[in-house]
């Protein structure tokens, strides 16, 4: 589906499905520019555009090491005028991740060495109860590796969900929503 075909549901969610977009298309989409009519007050196009710029820097690093299946989600794909960040995940090989190879390769590229998912590396941020990863502090983006493991997000029955399932649901309501697959 093209960036022009994106619309929010009446619940303010991106309709269920995978939307393959380039960064150029993403910047032209409703996710950055906002709805055509002013139904959502205080839409912060410049903030959303900045978040996309930040996500693009990290996604390009993933592409550089051969990771291509990368998904963007969170409140960014919702009709929230100013989302706190962009969340997402990328698909990778368990052995490549477990060996530390992916993290090492990414930190060779990133000038701030922010690629870690160790909970000990999380730091507090004023106004937030949850401690954030270094990538969030620098880029306001959190991209998690997915190799089949549970996400830490539970469904309404308390069962652990894997990233593809968890990231395609609105956390508060459990309603299905769409997700962006970033393509080159």
Image (spheres, rainbow, N blue to C red):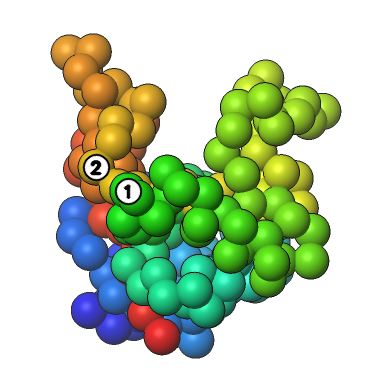
The outermost residue toward the top is 158
For the C terminus, the image quarter is bottom left
Q: Which residue is mark 2?
A: 148
Pick whichever, 92 or 48, lies toward us: 92
Q: Earlier in the sequence, mark 1 or mark 2?
A: 1
Residue 68: in sight, yes or no?
A: yes
In this rendering, position of residue 110 left or right of residue 43? right
| 75 shown above or below 62 | above
| 175 shown above or below 180 | above
Q: Residue at x 75, y 29 (%)?
A: 123
Q: Residue at x 22, y 64 (%)?
A: 18
Q: Residue at x 19, y 60 (%)?
A: 17
Pick whichever, 129 or 146, lies toward us: 146
Q: Residues within 10 Å of mark 1 (few under 14, many from 20)?
A: some
In this rendering, position of residue 7 left or right of residue 72? left
The mark closer to the camera, 1 or 2, is 1
The outermost residue toward the front is 99
Pick whichever, 66 or 34, lies toward us: 66
**Residue 116, quarter of picture:** top right
- Image coordinates for residue 151, horizontal then vertical, percent: 35, 33
Q: Which residue is mark 1?
A: 94
Q: Residue at x 38, y 64 (%)?
A: 70
Residue 173: in sight, yes or no?
A: no
Q: Which mark is residue 106?
A: none
Check contact, mark 1 vs mark 2: CB within 8 A.
yes
In this rendering, position of residue 30 left or right of residue 122? left
Q: Residues within 10 Å of mark 2 (few under 14, many from 20)?
A: some
Q: What secondary structure is marked by label 2?
A: loop
């Amino acid at each position: 589906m093209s960036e022009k075909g994106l619309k929010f549901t009446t619940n303010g969610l991106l309709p269920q499905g995978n939307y393959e977009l380039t960064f150029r298309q993403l910047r032209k989409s409703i996710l950055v520019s906002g709805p055509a009519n002013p139904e959502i007050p205080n839409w912060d196009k410049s903030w959303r555009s900045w978040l996309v710029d930040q996500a693009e820097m990290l996604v390009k690093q993933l592409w550089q090491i051969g990771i291509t299946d990368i998904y963007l989600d969170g409140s960014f794909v919702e009709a929230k005028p100013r989302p706190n960040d962009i969340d997402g995940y990328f698909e990778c090989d368990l052995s490549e991740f477990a060996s530390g190879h992916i993290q090492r390769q990414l930190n060779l590229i990133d000038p701030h060495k922010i690629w870690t998912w160790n909970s000990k590396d999380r730091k507090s941020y004023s106004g937030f109860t949850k401690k954030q990863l270094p990538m969030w502090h620098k880029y306001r983006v959190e991209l998690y590796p997915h190799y089949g493991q549970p996400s830490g997000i539970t469904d309404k029955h308390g069962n652990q969900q894997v990233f593809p399932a968890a990231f395609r649901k609105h956390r508060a309501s459990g309603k299905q929503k769409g997700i962006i697959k970033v393509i080159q």
